[in-house]
Image (tube, coloured by chain):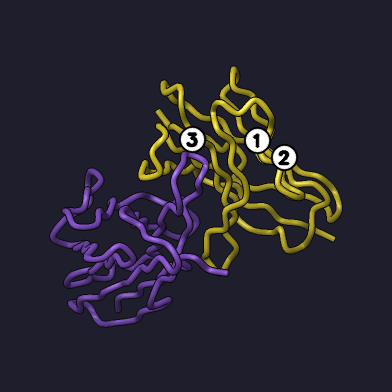
Amino acid sequence: AQKITQTQPGMFVQEKEAVTLDCTYDTSDQSYGLFWYKQPSSGEMIFLIYQGSYDEQNATEGRYSLNFQKARKSANLVISASQLGDSAMYFCAMREGTGTASKLTFGTGTRLQVTL
Amino acid sequence: GAVVSQHPSRVICKSGTSVKIECRSLDFQATTMFWYRQFPKQSLMLMATSNEGSKATYEQGVEKDKFLINHASLTLSTLTVTSAHPEDSSFYICSAPRGQGPHQPQHFGDGTRLSIL
């Protein structure tokens, strides 16, 4: 079974609008972390936002927020006021356990295209 | 600024050549680093976990003799693709966690595009 599922291969959003990128996960661990990364066409992986399994509040980081619904095992990324520079691949990832040396498992990604 | 440096960014070489890729943590020590491979339009697939001072841990299906990993210092891990062939052409990217605590993200290098002719 997939540990991280991103069901949207591609999304379009108009500039200045908000967009939600979906992510569901599967784990039996009580302690885990969820991450979102952005990958532009140049290839680098840019860390956007983190949500810990014990965090009671949804994470926010500038225009990025994470809609964390633990019971549903979902961790959707919300990008507000989209900009042309937001066009990229977005990956949801999970780290199980609390160790920083624990590996990340990535979803298949969502390609976001911001239009004028 | 970048916290993980990866070099080279692009390699084009003939079949049979061995290629070494370096991954450095710039202002922190990393006892663990990770190496990923990414095919076009696909996700990142973990190849191996690089452990400073000990053997790397390889994921299932990854050939240890093909992809040699050395983590000789707390700031440097290297991946050597031995006797590379066209099917080894891919995007290779490394990462390292910075600092302690589960909230610390893994920071990635800028990746290496490897093309074997």
The quarter in which the C terminus of chain A is drawn is bottom right
Residue at which label 2 appears: A20
Q: Quadrant of residue A74?
A: top right
Residue at which label 3 appears: A4
Q: Which chain is purple?
A: B
The residue under the point 42% across, 62% down is B28
What amino acid is found at the position of numbered circle 2 in the picture?
Thr
Chain letter of disc 2?
A: A
Q: Nearer the viewer, residue B54 or A95?
A: B54
Chain letter of disc 1?
A: A
Residue B57 on image: x %, y %: 22, 48
| Left or right: residue A50 compared with residue A77 | left
The residue under the point 67% across, 37% down is A59
Residue at which label 1 appears: A76
Marks 2/1 same chain? yes
| Left or right: residue A56 compared with residue A2 | right
Secondary structure beneath dot 2 equals strand
Residue A106 on image: x %, y %: 46, 43
The residue under the point 61% across, 33% down is A75
* Image marks 2 and 1: residues in contact by CB distance under 8 Å: yes
Residue A31 on image: x %, y %: 46, 27
Secondary structure beneath dot 3 equals strand
Q: Which chain is yellow?
A: A
Q: Earlier in the sequence, mark 1 or mark 3?
A: 3
Q: Is residue A116 above or below residue B100?
A: below
